[in-house]
Each structure stands twice: as C-alpha cells, then as structure tokens.
Amino acid sequence: MAETSSFPPQSFDALVIGAGLAGLAVALGLKRAGLNAACIGRPERAGPGRTVALLGQSLDILDGLGVLGEVESRGAAMRTLRMVDDTGSLFANRPVDFRASEIGRDVFGWNIENSALAPVLEAALGEAPRFEAEVVGFD
C-alpha cells in the first residue's frame, strides 16, 4: 500500500491544483483579489532553455498581477516576427518580417525562459500557502 500524508485541516477560499506557471499565475491572481488561496502541486519546470512567448492578453494579465516590469527585465523583447515558408514546396515564399513599429508598438511581446518566469511569480506570491504534494482528494 502506498504511503500517503495529509495536511492538518485548513480552510481556504480557493485551491489551485498545479504549481506550474499557470497555477502560480492563478494563485497570484486570487491573492491579488483578496482571497485566501493555496497552490498545491509539484513545480512543473521544463529544462533549461525552454521559453514562453508572451503576447497580447498574457501581457495584460501579467501587468494586472503587477509583475510585467519584472518579466520585461528578465525577458527578450520581440520587436520583429519572421514568417518562414517551411512547407518544402519547390516554389517556397521568401521569409517576411513584421516589425512592431509598423503597428505603432515598441514590441510585440516578450520571450522569457520558464526558469526565469517561475521565480517572478513565486516571489510575488510571497508567503501565500503552497504545498508541494500530489492531490488525491479533499473535503
């Protein structure tokens, strides 16, 4: 029989199951909304060099969470996006570059390593309850 451990009974307004980047962001949003939320799960970190491109609404969410400035300082600005025809066609189209300045923006977004984004979210969570465990049930 597998050994299990349980936490002392506690009461929370919300439980966030999952401690990856999305779980941390949700827990931070709940905290910012004034709720007593716990984040439960093992951190899901990809290996070194794994990145996420943050655009549009993702940037709006991070701004609302108060961490966008920190993300910008750790990430790489995406000022140009290149479309490449990788269809293998004999008559492939030439690559086309789009520049953020063409639509009146400084950047399209930010590219940041997962291993750099997680500590930003964790630091913003501060002392919010976090449990590194697998959830098998709750009441």
Image (cartoon, rainbow, N blue to C red):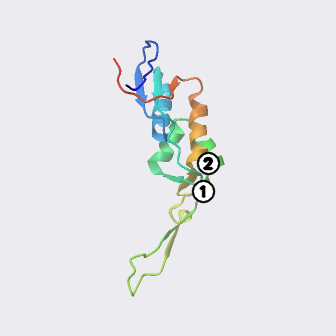
Q: Is residue 29 above or below residue 73?
A: above
Task: Left or right? Give the position of 24 relative to 90.
Answer: right
- Quadrant into which the N terminus falls: top left
Q: Residue furthest top?
A: 9
**What amino acid is found at the position of numbered circle 2 in the picture?**
Glu
The reply to whether residue 67 is visible in this rendering is no
**What amino acid is found at the position of numbered circle 1 in the picture?**
Ala
Task: For marks 1 and 2, give the CA distance.
Answer: 7 Å
The reply to whether residue 5 is visible in this rendering is yes
Q: Give the total of numbered labels.
A: 2
Q: Is residue 86 above or below residue 130?
A: below
Please give the residue where the numbered disc 2 appears in the rendered image: 72
- Quadrant into which the C terminus falls: top left
Foreground residue, 98 or 103?
98
At label 1, counting other C-alpha atoms closer than 10 Å, the crowd grade (few under 14, some 14-19, many 20 or more) is some
Residue drawn at point x = 45 percent, y = 34 percent: 26
Please give the residue where the numbered disc 1 appears in the rendered image: 77
Q: Earlier in the sequence, mark 1 or mark 2?
A: 2
